Image (cartoon, rainbow, N blue to C red):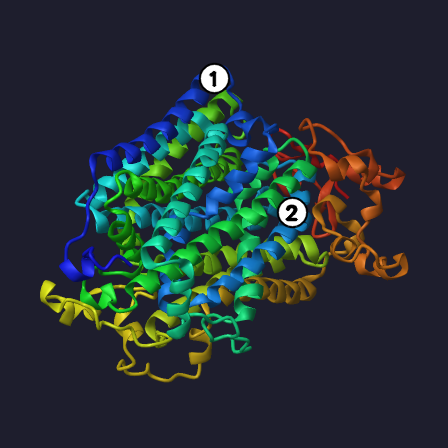
Amino acid sequence: MDMERKYSYQTGEKSTFGTIDYVLFGGLLMVSASIGLFYAIKDRNKHTTKDFLLAGGNMHVVPVALSLLASFMSAITILGTPSEMYKYGTMYCWIGLSYFFAVFLSAHIYIPIFYRIGITSSYEYLEFRFGQAARLAGALTYIVQMTIYMACVLYAPSLALNAVTDFNLWGSIWAVGLVCTFYTSIGGMKAVLWTDTFQTFMMLVGLLAVLIQGSIEIGGFQRAWDIAYNNSRIEFLEFSPDPTVRHSVWSLVIGGTFLWTFVYGVNQAQVQRAVACPTLKKAQLAYWINCPGLAIILYLTAMIGIVIYGFYSKCDPLELGLISAGDQLLPLFVMDVLGRIPGIPGLFLACMFSGALSTISSGLNSISAVILTDLVRKYCCTRISEKKATIISKILAVVIGFAAIGLTYVAAMLGGILEAALALYGILGGPLLGAFTLGMLFPWANQIGAVVGIVTSLVFMFWISVGFQIYRPEVAALAPISTVDCNWNITTIAATATTTMTTFTGNASSVLSNATAAPESTPLMGLYTLSYMWYTATAVATVVIVGLIVSFITGATKPETLDPRLMCPFFDIVCPYLPEKILKPLRFGVRYDKLGEADITRRPSTRSEVNPHLQDEKEKEAGALGWSVDGQVVDKGAANPGADTSLGEEGGTSVSTRL
């Protein structure tokens, strides 16, 4: 560390943007908008929802893989992970192992089913398997969850910008939100994929610049590691099975697998990217290319967090009152160590906003697809033309963009962004993953069981989250934070800092001190103090257990009556080398032998395409009558009067072959 230089905790002054920094930041917005404008002009004669929402279903693997990476490695990861390392230590790094398991499950268990049936919205599957009520519940839950998440993602980099410069917080929110809405609404999925590709490189360049220069500033990464180790920040051996332990190997690997399987396996934003590839194998390749990228960004941000701790180990800027939230640590550090280098602060902020733009554009495009497919075309305009549907999709993207900007004002009150975002996924995303898991892996589940399971899980998870807010557990830091090198003459707010800041869990006073009184005891305290990393797994288990119990009470579905395209031969995929005499009973009677190669490896090319492999002579008679709901062959019109009875929109396949 350069002892001749004076830093913010010594002078009380924070560096600000220079002209070149603003130019770089503005350049990011201009390039992103230009990509959207380019595809709006290039595809001006294409007026189908397949082109606008699925990029024509013929995208190259590389941009899809980079878009998968950028979409949910957002500014929340860039800001939240270093804060996690600074405050709690390195246990969070174990979540990187969960990426491998999540990508495997997503690419080989969930995505193939969406490919077989050729859907636009992933929630179409829920209707084919469980009926309209399940589809509607899933679609509405996703719309709420993703809109709130976009607001969090938009707020995060704007907060960082406000922390390191005089640029107006809400002015930056509106600028980024409007640019993102603009290029998404006019350019569609192609614009989203290619801007994500550009923004991924911006994120990597920005993170590397911060890590390299920060390590140089402190005297090398090894020195930062040693400082963190000597202050109990290096911790990898928390193997406690207690589910109330905030971070353990089990919660991060197992709980993280459930969380990221929702993100990559059934989340509409990622499913859209998968089906934008021309074949299933290419979609799976995109997922595996994305996997190491996830780990690279995670560990880059974790290493930056270690460097930040080494830099501020003798003067905590939160205690000193230089910043009001742990999520502002990284931008403060950047301005301290890189502020004197023209352009680097601007590159860093371009990095953060790249993460935000990629996530928000993905959300806008995916929510537009869900509203159009699951609500507008289902209940309002069943006979709408492709051209009008595309126009509606663009209008929806604009409306949702403004809604996300408005909800940013709510996100400002959520506290620590990393924990808030992951908890949101568990509360709302967990029940959705549970619904798909119930449908794809448990052939006995029926419509009543699925709907009751989803509703029960949503209510249960909200109950836990409300209980957590009321009986918020005390989370102690791993070691006392030092202020020995702080210049207390530069600020008059240090005495009240712990009452004004909203750090990692939104309650800084309990994080920075052990003086906070323990919450009032209640018989349900163990439930309320459940680690947020277990939220998704808990929600999935609730849906599956409740769903199966209700299904067996109300009349379980007969596995042999189900269309095998809607089911996953789990043990054939996970344990392919087991002998057939063991695998056959593990298929539980589902007729996977009726699946042909075409059903497995490519998407249906037209809405009227029929799979002859699914029909023998008796089944043709049944198929002519309709399709299976809860194992019973019903008339299509009677089961869903006035509704589109095909499997999917453009690129779907007829349900007239259902068993």
Quadrant location, the C terminus? top right
Circle 1: element type: helix
**Image coords of residue 67 (percent x, y):** 51, 39
Depth order, front residue of 629/471: 471
Name the quadrant containing residue 20: top left
* Residue indicated by mark 2: 107
Relative height, residue 38 to residue 627 (above, below)? above
Quadrant location, the N terminus? bottom left
Mark 2 closeness class: few <14, some 14–19, many ≥20 residues within 10 Å: many
Question: Left or right of 315: which side holds 86?
Answer: right
Name the quadrant containing residue 253: bottom right
Q: Earlier in the sequence, mark 1 or mark 2?
A: 1
Question: Left or right of 119: which side holds 331?
Answer: left
Amino acid identity at mark 2: Ala
Question: Left or right of 166: which side holds 470?
Answer: right
Circle 2: element type: helix
Amino acid identity at mark 1: Lys
Label annotation for residue 4? none
Look at 47% across and 48% down and name the residue there: 142
* Residue indicated by mark 1: 42
**Image coords of residue 404 (percent x, y):** 34, 43
Structural distance between the alpha carbons of marks 1 and 2? 31 Å
